[in-house]
Image (cartoon, helix red, strand yellow):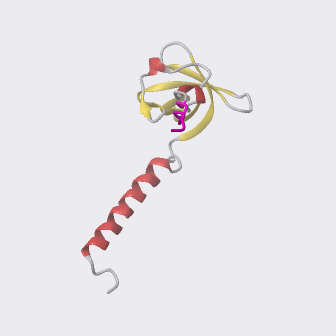
C-alpha cells in the first residue's frame, strides 16, 4: 500500500482540510451574496455609497453583524475612510442592498517606509 504511513495520511488530511477552508474563504460568494468592487464613501449612520469603475453608484446599508476588514484586520465602521477602494459582499433584503462583508484595500501610504540598509565602512 503506497500510503501506509500514518504520518503521510495525517499530512494529506491536514492539506485537504486547509484547502477546503481556503476555498470556502476565498471562493465565489454564495447564492444569496453578490460582490461589488469600487470606491466607498461614508454616508449617515450605517450607510455607505460605492462607486464602481463604470461610475455607477450604489447605496448600501451595513448589516449589524457586518465584517469590515482593512489590511487583514477587522475594524469598526467608524474607521472607514472615504475614497478607499473596497470589495463589498451584499445581499438584497426588502429591495435594499445590505453589506455583509467589506474588505478595504490598503495603499502604499498605509505601510511604513522601508529603512535604508546600514552602510558598510571598509576596515
Please say if 38 is above or below 7.
above
Toward the viewer: 68 or 105?
105
> If the image is split into quadrants, where does the N terminus sit?
bottom left
Q: In x, y percent, where is residue 122? A: 54, 38
Please say if 22 is above or below 68.
below
Can residue 94 be spotted in the picture?
no
**Residue drawn at the location 52% of the way across and 30% of the way down:** 115
Q: In x, y percent, where is residue 98? A: 50, 29
Residue most extreme to the bottom: 1
Can residue 42 be spotted in the picture?
yes
Is 55 one of the magenta-colored residues?
no
**Residue drawn at the location 36% of the way across and 60% of the way down:** 17
Toward the viewer: 21 or 91?
21
Residue most extreme to the left: 6
Residue most extreme to the right: 54
Q: In x, y percent, where is residue 100? A: 46, 33
The answer to whether residue 54 is left or right of residue 71 is right
**Residue drawn at the location 60% of the way across and 36% of the way down:** 36
Q: Characterize the magenta stretch by its predominant secondary structure.
A: loop
The answer to whether residue 39 is left or right of residue 22 is right
Q: In x, y percent, where is residue 62? A: 48, 25
Residue most extreme to the top: 44
Segment colored magenta: 114-123
Q: How many marks?
A: 0
Please say if 70 is above or below 79.
below
Toward the viewer: 56 or 78?
78
Amino acid at each position: 500500500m503506497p500510503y501506509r504511513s500514518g504520518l503521510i495520511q495525517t499530512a494529506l488530511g491536514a492539506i485537504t482540510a486547509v484547502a477546503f477552508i481556503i476555498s470556502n474563504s476565498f471562493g465565489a460568494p454564495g447564492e444569496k451574496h453578490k460582490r461589488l468592487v469600487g470606491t466607498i464613501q461614508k454616508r449617515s449612520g450605517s450607510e455607505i455609497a460605492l462607486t464602481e469603475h463604470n461610475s455607477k453608484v450604489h447605496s448600501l446599508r451595513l448589516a449589524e453583524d457586518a465584517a469590515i476588514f482593512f489590511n487583514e484586520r477587522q475594524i469598526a465602521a467608524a474607521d472607514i475612510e472615504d475614497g478607499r477602494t473596497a470589495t463589498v459582499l451584499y445581499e438584497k433584503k426588502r429591495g435594499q442592498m445590505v453589506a455583509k462583508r467589506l474588505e478595504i484595500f490598503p495603499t502604499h501610504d498605509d505601510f511604513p517606509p522601508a529603512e535604508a540598509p546600514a552602510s558598510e565602512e571598509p576596515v
